[in-house]
Amino acid sequence: MTRPTLALTGPDVAAGGAPAACLRLAELYGAGAAAVVCDLGGIGPPGLGAVDTLARLRLTARRLGRGLTVTGAGPELRALLALAGLGELLGEPEQREPPVGVEEGVEPGDPAP
């Protein structure tokens, strides 16, 4: 079974476009979709509107207990989300530095730093 796709374009991710995109997502879920594919390939150069829209779509999916897969995110959007600390919105785990004061395991015979 094919999952429905929510294809976003520039106007969808412009400032103030998030509520309409979330409404379309909720309608897809309301029509019986357990999960939706969100295609970001057509948004053009991303800005903070894209970050806002994607964050709100993730919250909508989470609130409704449904799945959301994001595709088509270009390197500019990935970089913008990483800069904002929101890389996990793409469904990828965020890479963080280990907390200060936590030492990595050392194997016997490893040279001293």
Image (cartoon, rainbow, N blue to C red):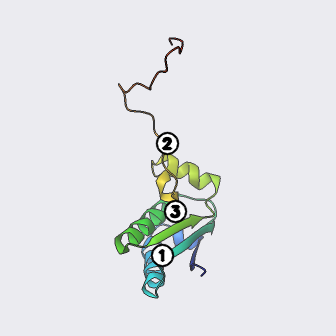
Extreme-bottom residue of the structure? 31
Instruction: Give the residue at mark 2.
Output: 95
- Other-residue count near label 1 (Cα within 10 Å), few / some / many at <14 / 14–19 / ≥20: many
Instruction: Give the residue at mark 3.
Output: 50
- Looking at the image, which is closer to me, 85 or 1? 1
Q: Is residue 65 visible?
A: yes
| Alpha carbons under labels 3 and 2: distance apart | 21 Å
Q: Is residue 42 visible?
A: no
73 w.r.t. 17: above or below:
above
Image spot of residue 17 (x, y percent): 47, 72
| Alpha carbons under labels 2 and 1: distance apart | 28 Å
Image spot of residue 36 (x, y percent): 52, 75
- Labels in figure, total: 3
Sequence-wise, the earlier of marks 1 and 3 is 1
Mark 2 or mark 1, whichever is nearer to me: 2
Image spot of residue 60 (x, y percent): 39, 71
Disc 3 residue type (three-letter) = Ala
Disc 2 residue type (three-letter) = Gln
- Looking at the image, which is closer to me, 113 or 89? 113
Q: Is residue 93 left or right of residue 2?
A: left
Instruction: Give the residue at mark 1.
Output: 21
Image spot of residue 45 (x, y percent): 62, 59
Q: Is residue 35 left or right of residue 10?
A: left
Tell me the element at label 1.
Answer: helix
Residue under the image location 56 percent in, 72 percent down: 37
Mark 3 or mark 2, whichever is nearer to me: 2
Q: Is residue 57 left or right of residue 74?
A: left
Q: Quadrant of the N terminus?
A: bottom right
